[in-house]
Image (spheres, helix red, strand yellow):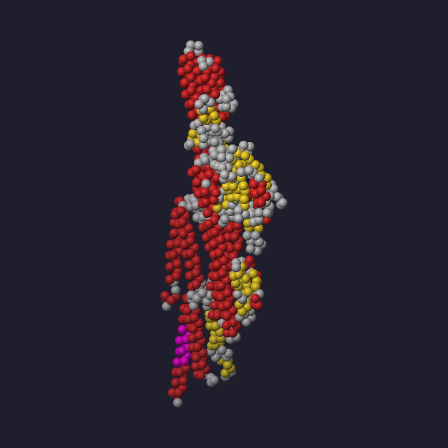
């Protein structure tokens, strides 16, 4: 190309183009001011290589070399990591709110109030043992208590199901995201042979950031610009163009590698929404559900054991146990018997009293041997059948049934073996878990069977105005018992501990620990919120668009463009001048 | 630091969200007047609240037990005092009748008075509270004593006194073993009030002065026994009274502690709400100013 005016024109043309690029980029920035994850871009200008002319090096104008984006992948990654734990706590906090609502303790319908009322009603019975109103009130209230236990249990179960459903939806979204990232990896690697694929990289960061909201993950950038993403337990979710799915199998999350190779990563997911949901489901909900059942079990047992020592306003003409054995030939005191409270049975005996129609008593002690080789349901049946005027049978559900001969009734006293309570004979509650609790239907159909009195162990006589057993029942509210308390840990397994406390104290500490858990989760959430905001500000400070800045840029380029245009018109005038010379 | 538009918008959003949350909580505290709105607000405080509420419910029940026990004791005391009055009356009658100046006819008519006294004493021994016989041991459903046609008296109750609970480790016998009260040495014993009266009547009818004298001695013995019994009831009343006072004090103290932990200090809560309100308004005003600023407005 020639020197002189031609050179000026060429410089002017390049300058116009460069300023236009600048305005394009500024326009792109302004347009994306609200696009999430967008990193502002800048056109990079460079002076062209000078040419030697007439003994001097003449500059040849401007060149637009590349468009760069203001972004720091290290900061991006830190934001993602922090977001991962923030979303974990956020989800846990949400579900904790629901749980705190279930244990709505600061109200009059709470389980705590109901337990207190239960003991009070026994006090009332002890004050008027033969009163009908007191007995009905106790029965109705006991139904309410067992319903409350049951509904808490089923609400916790529902929470568990909800969490598994949430995990399922989360797993689906993770798979969508990893597939999209693998796709972008592919495009970026293809495009970056020429120049940085700025906008695609931003898109990929947005997706990676959303992935971090769901699950633990680490990003490794390869030399060709692709991301390799590794998750919990070191499983690879994305590698180059390939993505690997995770799936929900029952309640566990499994990673599916190539060639049908599966890895269970459930207990290793500790961050993101999935981590929060799994923590909630397998550690918190599971623990409190188990603790509630331990409490219900101990409560049922304590009440039943005392109740089986007493006698109602009249003897039984027929009674059926509420607990079934799995095999009538197995020893009652061993686990093989299948009884819920088999471990409470010990060597001992109980008295079976038979009354004729005029109320005269004949007593027969029945001995129980709890050891292996000891009493089975069948041998107990035989022993009872040895007593005249009563007959024992075993129902089709493997429960013990005792019937009196016509005109006779019977009652029990002084059970040192606990076998009556363990078989559910003359007991108050049925079931052995929070979800399976109920009130013995025999009491439901005749409140006279609420055992407020005890039989005189020498004469076999009992009085309707006697409140000995009711007073003993009342004492249960003050007595401490050993109740199991669980710790659920996904990594180290679940461990059973024991607390010695009264029924109410145990429940209060259960509720208290739930509150402590809730407040510590809320605190962690708040802390992570601040951290994410801090890191985000760092990221935005570097990468996001400032409109004031862009407006300034716009003016800058506009003026430069006008000047370059002027250059052309000046060159034109110069050429005209030269042409006019001829 | 370079501040981009997004940073400004994000911070405005975050701060407004925080302050709205605080405002909401302050408002809830004022509305409910409770300091603890959910478990996690103060788990330790809540556990205390729960156990205090349990104690309160227990205290209320024990107070109910005590007031029921008191009604039994009052009835028991008044029945026994009346019996004592009757015993004194009978004794006075005896003094008159044993005198040589009294004739057989007068003694026979006095025998009728003694018959009335006997019936009255049996009826007092069958005193009921809310339909329950208080001198029948634990057999509170049936009359404690029956007066037979030959003026002998049968005890239908048992020897287990009716007991109520007035504290965690405290029980009080409020009902009586009727035999211990009216027949301390057993039915037919020399201090069996029914037998004394029956024998007195027979003696009066039979004009038997030495029989009347024996009855006088026996009445004295029973009078002493009766006084001891009344004193026993009185001391139980005092015990109940003391326990009742203790429970009332405990009730007040616990309620006060409960309120301290659970209830919001209302002036403090309202001040807090006001402060949050001012902060919220200030934040809104500041935001609206900052968000309007842009270079575009000056171009």
Residue B209 makes an appearance in the image:
yes
Q: Position of residue A8 (x, y in %)?
A: 44, 81
Q: What residue is shown at x 52% (from left), y 72% (from top)? A: A186
Q: Reply yes or no: does residue A568 show up in magenta.
A: yes
Q: Position of residue A124 (x, y in %)?
A: 45, 37
Q: Residue furthest bottom?
A: A582
- Magenta span contains residue A510: no
Q: Residue at x 54, y 32 (%)?
A: A459
Residue A54 image point, x, y percent = 50, 84
Q: Viewer-proximal residue, A247 or A222? A: A247
- Judging depth in this view, the residue of B296 and A508 nearest the camera is A508
Up the image or down, A54 lies above or below B219; here it is below
Residue drawn where x is 57% and y is 56% of the image? A491
Q: Which residues are magenta?
A: A557-570
Q: Residue at x 45, y 26 (%)?
A: B146
Considering the image in quadrants, where does the C terminus of chain A appear?
A: bottom left
Q: Is residue A9 left or right of residue A353?
A: left
Would you say the magenta stretch is mainly helix, strand or loop?
helix
Q: Where does residue A380 sit, x and y in percent of width and height?
A: 58, 42
Q: Nearer the viewer, residue B226 or A159?
A: B226
Work out whether B244 lies above or below B185. Answer: below
Residue found at the very far front of the displayed protein: A406
On screen, residue A568 above or below A456: below
Q: Is residue A227 visible?
A: no
The number of numbered badges drawn on the structure is 0
Which is nearer the eye, A54 or A537?
A537
């Amino acid at each position: 190309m020639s020197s002189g005016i031609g050179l000026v024109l060429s410089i002017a043309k390049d300058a116009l183009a460069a300023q236009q690029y600048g305005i394009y980029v500024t326009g792109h920035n302004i347009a994306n001011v609200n696009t999430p994850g967008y990193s502002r871009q800048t056109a990079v200008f460079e002076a062209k290589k000078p040419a030697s002319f007439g003994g001097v090096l003449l500059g040849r104008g401007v060149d637009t070399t590349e468009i760069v984006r203001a972004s720091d992948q290290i900061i991006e990654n830190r934001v993602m990591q922090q977001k991962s734990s923030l979303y974990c706590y956020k989800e846990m906090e949400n579900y904790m709110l629901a749980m705190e609502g279930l244990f709505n303790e600061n109200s009059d319908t709470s389980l705590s109030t109901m337990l207190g009322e239960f003991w009070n009603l026994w006090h009332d019975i002890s004050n008027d043992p033969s009163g009908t109103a007191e007995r009905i009130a106790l029965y109705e209230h006991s139904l309410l208590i067992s319903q409350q236990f049951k509904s808490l249990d089923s609400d916790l179960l529902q929470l568990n199901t909800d969490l598994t459903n949430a995990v399922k939806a989360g797993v689906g979204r993770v798979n969508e995201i990893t597939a999209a990232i693998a796709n972008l990896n592919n495009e970026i690697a293809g495009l970056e042979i020429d120049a940085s694929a700025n906008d695609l990289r931003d898109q990929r960061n947005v997706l990676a950031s959303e992935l971090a909201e769901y699950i633990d993950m680490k990003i490794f950038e390869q030399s060709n610009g692709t991301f390799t993403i590794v998750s919990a337990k070191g499983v690879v979710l994305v590698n180059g163009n390939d993505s690997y799915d995770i799936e929900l199998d029952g309640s566990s999350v499994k990673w599916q590698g190539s060639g049908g190779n599966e890895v269970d990563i459930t207990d290793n997911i500790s961050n993101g929404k999935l981590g929060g949901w799994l923590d909630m489901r397998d550690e918190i909900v599971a623990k409190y559900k188990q603790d509630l059942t331990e409490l219900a079990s101990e409560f049922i047992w304590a009440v039943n054991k005392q109740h089986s020592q007493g006698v109602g306003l009249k003897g039984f003409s027929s009674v059926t146990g509420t607990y079934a054995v799995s095999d009538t030939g197995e020893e009652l005191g061993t686990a093989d018997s299948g009884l819920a409270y088999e471990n409470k049975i010990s060597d001992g005996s109980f008295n079976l009293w038979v009354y004729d129609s005029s109320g005269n008593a004949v007593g027969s002690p029945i001995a129980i041997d709890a050891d292996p080789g000891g009493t089975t349901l069948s041998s107990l049946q035989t022993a009872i059948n040895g007593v005249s005027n009563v007959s024992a049978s075993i129902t089709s559900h493997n429960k013990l049934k005792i019937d009196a001969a016509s005109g006779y009734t019977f009652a029990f006293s002084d059970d040192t073996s606990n076998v009556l309570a363990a078989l559910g004979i003359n007991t108050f509650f049925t079931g052995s878990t929070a979800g399976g609790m109920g009130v013995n239907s025999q009491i439901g159909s005749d409140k006279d069977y609420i055992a407020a009195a005890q039989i005189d162990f020498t004469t076999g006589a009992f009085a309707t105005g006697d409140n000995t057993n009711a007073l003993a029942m009342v004492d249960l509210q003050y007595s401490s018992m050993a109740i199991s308390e669980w710790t659920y840990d996904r990594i180290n397994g679940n461990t059973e501990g024991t607390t010695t406390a009264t029924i109410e104290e145990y429940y209060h500490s259960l509720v208290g620990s739930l509150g402590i858990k809730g407040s510590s989760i809320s605190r962690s959430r708040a802390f992570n919120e601040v951290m994410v905001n801090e890191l985000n500000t760092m990221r935005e400070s570097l990468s996001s668009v400032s409109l004031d800045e862009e407006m300034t840029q716009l003016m800058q380029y506009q003026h430069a463009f006008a000047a370059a245009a002027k250059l052309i018109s000046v060159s034109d005038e110069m050429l005209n001048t030269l042409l006019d010379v001829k | 630091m370079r501040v981009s538009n997004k940073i400004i918008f994000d911070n405005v959003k975050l701060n407004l969200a925080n302050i709205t949350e605080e405002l909401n909580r302050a408002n809830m505290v004022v509305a409910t007047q409770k300091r603890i709105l959910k478990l996690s607000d103060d788990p330790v405080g809540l556990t205390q609240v729960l156990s205090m509420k349990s104690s309160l419910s227990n205290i209320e029940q024990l107070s109910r037990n005590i007031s029921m026990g008191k009604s039994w004791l009052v009835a028991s005391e008044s029945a026994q005092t009346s019996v004592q009055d009757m015993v004194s009356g009978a004794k006075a009658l005896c003094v008159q009748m044993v005198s040589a100046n009294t004739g057989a006819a007068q003694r026979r008519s006095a025998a009728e008075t003694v018959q009335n006294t006997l019936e009255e004493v049996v009826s007092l021994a069958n005193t009921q509270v809310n339909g329950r016989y208080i001198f029948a041991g634990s057999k509170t459903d049936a009359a404690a004593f029956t007066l037979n046609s030959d003026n002998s008296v049968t005890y239908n109750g048992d020897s287990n006194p009716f007991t109520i609970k007035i504290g965690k480790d405290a029980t009080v016998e409020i009902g009586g073993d009727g035999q211990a009260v009216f027949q301390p040495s057993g039915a037919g014993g020399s201090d069996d009030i029914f037998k004394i009266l029956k024998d007195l009547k027979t003696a009066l009818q039979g004009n038997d002065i030495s029989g009347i004298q024996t009855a006088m001695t026996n009445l004295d013995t029973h009078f002493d026994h009766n006084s001891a019994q009344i004193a026993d009831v009185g001391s139980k009343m005092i015990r109940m009274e003391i326990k009742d006072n203790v429970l009332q004090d405990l009730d007040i103290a616990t309620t006060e502690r409960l309120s301290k932990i659970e209830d919001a200090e209302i002036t403090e809560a309202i001040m807090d709400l006001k402060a949050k309100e001012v902060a919220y308004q200030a934040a809104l005003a500041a935001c609206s100013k900052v968000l309007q600023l842009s270079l575009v407005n000056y171009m």
